[in-house]
Amino acid sequence: RSDEFSCPLHAECQAQHMLERASKEEKTRQRRDAECKRTRREEHGIGWKLEQVPRNLACAKKMGFAAAPNGMYALTFDQESNTARLAQTASPAAALNLEY
């Protein structure tokens, strides 16, 4: 018997009903957890904000470099002169934060 409908159910129907109910409960729990996480992130200022992303333009100008089209610079090494220098890059994985 189903507790909700107080009518007889086949075993397979009851199993399906229990699975659907468990799935609904899980989705509700996930929504509640996501809302709690979002609220806590807002309270503590956690997460990425565009205005917090460092900009290399001012630092590059101070160092005498021309502005890179995408604002990204990488460190390159010249083996002949055994020196490192900044160069423009299109690869975010190679980019440096010049503010540090």
Image: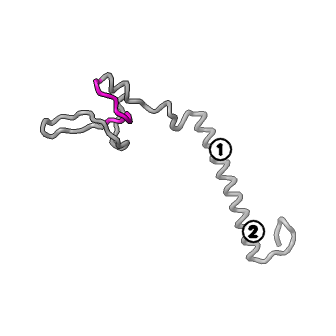
Q: How is the image coloured?
A: one colour
**Residue 20 percent location from the top left of the image:** 72, 65
Q: Residue at x 28, y 24 (%)?
A: 64
Query: In front: 82, or 92?
Result: 92
From what the image shows, is residue 18 above or below residue 62? below
Q: Is 90 positioned to the left or the right of 25 in the image? A: left
From what the image shows, is residue 92 above or below residue 16? above
Query: In front: 100, or 90?
Result: 90
What label does residue 17 carry, if any? 2
Q: Residues within 10 Å of mark 1 (few under 14, many from 20)?
A: few
> Which image quarter holds the N terminus?
bottom right
Q: Is 50 positioned to the left or the right of 11 in the image? A: left
Rendering quarter of residue 99: top left
Give the residue at the far top of this rendering: 62
Query: In front: 76, or 66?
Result: 66
Residue stretch in magenta = 63-73
According to the image, label 1 marks what residue?
35
Q: Amino acid at mark 2?
A: His
**Residue 35 percent location from the top left of the image:** 65, 44
Q: Is 52 positioned to the left or the right of 74 in the image? A: right
